[in-house]
Amino acid sequence: MVLGVVSDTHGNVEGLRQAVSMMLEAAPIDLFVHLGDDYDDALIFEEYDRDYLRVPGVFSEYYADPSIPNRVIKEFEGWRFLLTHTDVSHANDLPSDLKPQNLIRAKQVDVILHGHTHIPRLEEIDGILFINPGHLKEKDKKGREPSFAIVEVVPDLLKARLVGLKGGEQIASIEIRKHLK
């Protein structure tokens, strides 16, 4: 399974379309994931005849709606992924929201897909892989260029790479083997 992962599009649907085109050229994307800011931007994925998952950003009106999950655990090829806008609890969390630090402590997830910081991230900490695809804004006050992530998942191996929107250069990559039981 191959995931195309974006976050923090902030209404830049043209940048999102560009990222989707680049992802589809680079890999056979099975599922798109949008990690918030802005929740409705993910509707663009419907133009590409691909499934998608999305979670809202912490300042979105959708985040306050208990019928819309703010954090979701999904299993892909035996790997447990947490989809969330933040990799830690947030002041705007609902009482029923999953708490990332509890999931991490209990080793209930293998991968955390998150956004919020606008800073691309591929980092393994205590056996859990944190992936932040960055942002897709035209201009970002933190000085980071727009980027996205492509995550290839098979039962015993996960490969993730961060790709810059301008020029398509690979920013970083990581491979992690999972020991099958």
Image (spheres, grey):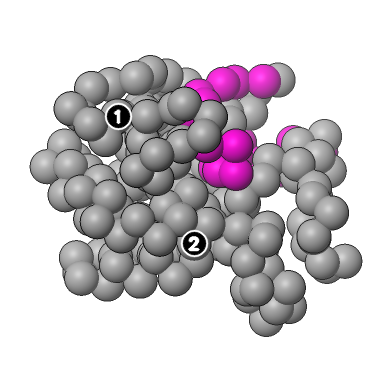
Identify whether 44 is placed above or below 87: below
Residue 129 versus residue 93 in the image, above or below: above
Please provide the residue range marked out in magenta. 106-125
Q: Is residue 108 one of those drawn in magenta? A: yes
Quarter holding the C terminus? top right
Image check: 17 left or right of 118?
A: left
User: Could you say which is closer to the camera, residue 87 or residue 136?
Assistant: 136
Give percent across and percent down for residue 13. 30, 60
Position in image of residue 132 (x %, y %): 51, 35
Foreground residue among 102 and 145: 145
Q: Could you say which disc has been placed on residue 38 in the image?
A: 2
Comes first in the chain, label 2 or label 1: 2
Outermost residue toward the right in this view: 95
Q: Which residue is drawn at 23% across and 31% down?
A: 166
Type of secondary structure dominating the magenta stretch:
loop
Q: Any magenta on residue 170? A: no
* Tag 1 residue: 164
Tag 1: Cα neighbours inside 10 Å, few (<14), some, or many (≥20)? many
- Looking at the rendered structure, which numbered label has been put on residue 73? none
Residue 32 vs residue 141: left or right? left
Taking the image as shown, residue 118 lies to the left or right of residue 4, namely right
Q: In this view, does 169 lie to the left or right of 146?
A: left
Instruction: Kindly indicate whether the residue at mark 1 contacts the one at mark 2 (C-beta within 8 angstroms).
Output: no
Residue 48: percent from the left, percent from the top? 19, 65
- For the residue labelled by badge 1, is the local secondary structure a helix, a strand or a loop? strand
Distance of label 2 from label 1 (alpha carbons): 20 Å
Query: Horizontal and vertical percent for residue 84?
Result: 62, 51
Instruction: From this view, report whether residue 100 is shown above or below residue 159.
Output: below
Q: Give the amino acid type for the residue marked by disc 1 in the picture.
A: Gly
Residue at the (70%, 78%) spot, across then down? 65
Q: Which amino acid does label 2 sit on?
A: Asp
Point out the residue furthest to the bottom here. Answer: 67
